[in-house]
Image (cartoon, rainbow, N blue to C red):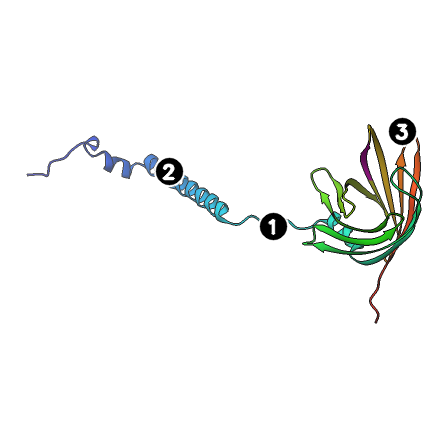
Amino acid sequence: MLPETREASDHPESFEFGNPFFQENGAMKRTFIVVVGTLVLFQLVLAQAPPRAPKPGPEHKRMAYFAGNWTVEGEMKASPFGPGGKFTGADHNEMLGGFFLVLHSQGKGPMGDMKSLAVMGYDRDNKAYFYNEYASAGHMESAKGSITGDTWTWNSEEKMGAKIVKSRFTLKELSPSSYSMQWETQDGTSWSTLMEGKATKVTKAK
């Protein structure tokens, strides 16, 4: 007696195994599953990996010019900001993490002894430098800056009574160890010079 024979439809799994179409389709399914699994695993690795720490850019490195110890001297002109006269000072500046410049200043001028702490940095979003200063006299000042060649320009606004007074501080690098500075205010149409001075870097004795 011959073995009983059945149609291929009675064993769909056998038909699928022997059919080239289903063989190719199954391989595609397996490839798809492998690709999806790899992508999911890659996303999990990215989620668990710590974010890369930002690195200082050329704008941050430019501030390193001011790092170190400096002596400052100049003259103030009498104005609503205070009496006129000569001033002297000393600055100790250091970079913080390569991103900020921290400035410790002390000196003596027409209004007596003074001390201040300031932080300079660069805002990548607004593509501008910023400067925030806190003085022992009880006031603070904020300014936005830019640099063109060897010249830094800082602009700020200060309220005096009912008026808004605009100020401009210009600093020009004369050499790696000296720079000149000028402070001006605007009365609405023209600029008036309130201060002029110079800073010299203190070099270590050999």
Which mark is on residue 188?
3
Within-10-Å neighbours for mark 2: few <14, some 14–19, many 20+: few
Q: Residues within 10 Å of mark 1 (few under 14, many from 20)?
A: few
Compared across the picture, whether 93 is left or right of 12 comes to right
Element under disc 3 = loop
Give the label, 1 or 3, closer to the camera: 3
176 or 68: nearer the viewer: 68
The answer, for residue 147, to whether it is visible in the render is yes
- Is there a contact, CB below 8 Å, between mark 2 and mark 3? no
Amino acid, disc 2: Lys
Looking at the rendered image, the quarter that the N terminus falls into is top left
Task: Kindly state the secondary structure of the residue where label 2 is placed.
Answer: helix
Dominant SS of magenta comes to strand
Identify the magenta region.
Answer: 155-160
The kind of residue on which mark 3 rests is Gly
Residue 106 position, x and y percent, is 81, 54
What residue does disc 2 label? 29
Q: Name the residue under label 1.
A: 53
In this view, which residue lies farthest toward the left?
1
Whether residues under marks 1 and 2 lie with C-beta atoms below 8 angstroms apart, the answer is no
Amino acid type, residue under disc 1 in the picture: Ala
Indicate the secondary structure of the residue bearing disc 1. loop
